[in-house]
Image (cartoon, grey):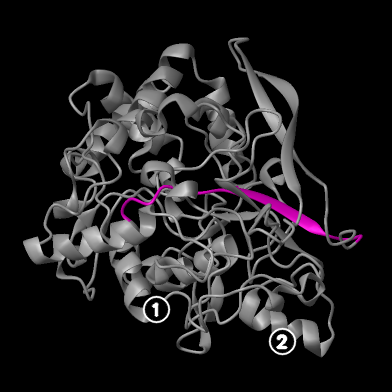
Amino acid sequence: MWLRLIGGLLCASLAVNAQANPLQSGGKTSTDKTGGNAFSMPASNLSFDKRLDFSVGNSFFRNPWVMAPATTDARDGLGPLFNTNACQGCHIKDGRGHPPQFKGDNAVSMLVRLSIPSTANAEHQAILKTQGVIPEPTYGGQLQDMAIPGAKPEGKVSISYQTQTQHLADASPVELRQPKVNISKLNYGPLHPEALFSARIAPPMIGLGLLEAISEADILAKENPKADGISGRANRVWDNKANTTVMGRFGWKAGQPSLRQQNASAFAGDMGITSALFLADDCTQAQDCAGFPNGGELEVSEDILDSVTFYSQHLAVPMRRGLDKPEVQAGEQLFLALGCSGCHTPSYTTGQHESPALSNQKIYPYTDLLLHDMGEGLADNRPEFLANGREWRTPPLWGLGYAPEVAGSEGAFYLHDGRARTLLEAILWHGGEAEQAKQSVMAANKTERAQLIAFLESL
């Protein structure tokens, strides 16, 4: 089916094919580590003293925070409401999270964002400018299902699924799961009648500093609508330090401008810990959190936030595997022929970054960092800054083949809410701007689909 198209692409790309299939996805930062700790290694080109800085950041990322007051005063101030007591609790082994799998499980590595529809009034418009959403009046910007002693968690999150069977052109069946967020045991009254929900699993941590080092100009150059119907756009979000609107890069809808702000936001929302960038946590007036102990005005010091940010910037991307396999090479040509690279841009060269290790690196993240309409099937119908309810930032694909071994017995889950249990399921949820590519995958034969998956697993 694809022979003529692949043949043409192969001839056209022979000169650049060595770059299209690099061994070092993260440039000189790449690691050859495999197995369960493949995502937890420092950038390979870090100097010895900078590896010590990485280790310090790792300790604050990995170790649990505790409620104040405590003898561990560098890591106190947890809560009073929170989702987890350590960054590692969501980003398991620095990899992706997963939805609750069994009855009674805590969500832990999956968050539920909350908001309500905005209005044209001046108060809402001011909130939208700096927060991107209108938080739910009683429960804030996300549901926190844990609390310190004496406080009540906001509620209990569970996920139920409605299944459907998708038949491919060769009649092969694939079961897809449509998740539904269920919130019970609400301790602070009913939710707003128009409350919006969005389930989000934690994304993998690898290569984030390299994504930060891609120049804004290189990202914005890909914004313009293309003849193939793919039309990504950058999100525009609030930078708390610069006190202005800038381009977003991080989060499932590119709602954060920098890793430092992304980390500070997670401290405030996920763990109830304040910082210079977020002077308040996610508690609302209805929850009366002021009466509980805290770890001071800035529970995360600037030095600790620096350390955690350095750590998150320098987690190495594992090297690619299986590049010499014919099925991987054929799968790459299918990936290009199907137009997947229209959103999953294969490569960039990073610009100058405050970290020399991240500067001027040829990298292969397979993302454009832009928002794309992914269709009604993946829609959460919840806007965030410029992103509408059908738009998601293109996730990087590097490290995709390592996801199952990093996840271990928990198993790897894909897409923003972890609904997909396999890469094929994830592809079949694509719609909107990716609808044509998805239909072509459905029309492919079993061998071609296996080649495409082999390519993705080589990343």
Q: Is residue 384 above or below residue 331?
A: below
Magenta span dominant secondary structure: loop
Q: Which of 229 and 130 lies nearest the eye of the viewer?
A: 130
Magenta region includes residue 199:
yes
Residue with the mark numbered 1: 301
Q: Which of 444 and 110 lies nearest the eye of the viewer?
A: 110
In contact (CB < 8 Å): disc 2 and disc 1? no
Residue with the mark numbered 2: 126
Q: Residues within 10 Å of mark 1 (few under 14, many from 20)?
A: some
| Image position, residue 159 (x, y; %) | 72, 37
Of label 2 and label 1, which has the lower sequence position? 2
- Mark 1: which amino acid? Ser
Query: In the figure, is residue 21 to the left or right of 257?
Result: left
| Image position, residue 141 (x, y; %) | 69, 66
Query: In the figure, is residue 5 to the left or right of 296?
Result: left
Residue 221 visible somewhere in the drawing: no
Residue at left 33%, top 40%?
Answer: 399
**Magenta-highlighted residues:** 193-207
Q: Is residue 357 above or below residue 239?
A: above
